[in-house]
Image: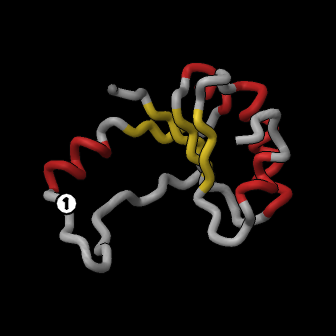
Amino acid sequence: MRWDVKVWHAPSRPRVGRSASVGRPLRPAADRDRAIVRLRFVDSLDVAASADLVVEAVVENEGAKCMLFAQLDRWAPARAILASNTSSIPSARLALATGRPD
């Protein structure tokens, strides 16, 4: 399966690179490069209308993330997976901002 991935982000383009993973070998650079070209970094919610996967990366603020998830819930199709890069906010709280309990 091949997905068209669109990522909504803050104004500056995030850096995508290699990272070490404890106990696992790094993937070859060619694998990383093939994955990166399939990502689209965007700053408009309208592209969520055709997304299969949306990963938000806004400021680590529950209110901001919940507001974005509520908007994504309206824009993204029901089949779309809405994901977050949060490290401190329970994903169940973010899901409550949507009509998608899972």
Q: Which residue lies most toward the front here? A: 102
Quadrant housing residue 89: bottom right
Q: Which residue is drawn at 31% across and 73% down?
A: 21
* x and y, in percent, of residue 94 in the image: 77, 52
Residue drawn at x 69%, y 72% as measured from the top left: 88
Q: On the rendered structure, is 93 left or right of 29?
A: right
Total marks shown come to 1
Q: In this view, does 57 lie above or below 52?
A: below
Residue at 31% over, 70% down: 19
Left-right relation of 34 to 84: left
Q: In this view, does 90 lie above or below 64?
A: below
Q: Is residue 24 above or below residue 64?
A: below
Q: Residue farthest to the bottom?
A: 22
Secondary structure of the residue carrying numbered label 1: loop
Crowding at label 1, few (<14), some or many (≥20) Cα neighbours within 10 Å? few
Instruction: Look at label 1 and name its amino acid.
Output: Arg
Direction from residue 5 to residue 21 in the image, left or right: left
Which color scheme is applied? secondary structure
Mark 1 — residue?
A: 27
Q: Which quarter of the figure has residue 102?
A: top right
Question: Could you tell me which quadrant the N terminus lies in?
Answer: top left
Q: In x, y percent, where is residue 25?
A: 19, 70
Say above or below: 52 vs 98.
above
Given residues 32 and 88, the one toward you in this image is 88
63 or 13, which is in the foreground? 63
Return the x and y of residue 60 as percentages of the image width and height. 71, 66
Task: Left or right? Give the position of 10 relative to 37.
Answer: right
> Residue at coordinates 29% horizontally, 43% vertically from top-left?
35
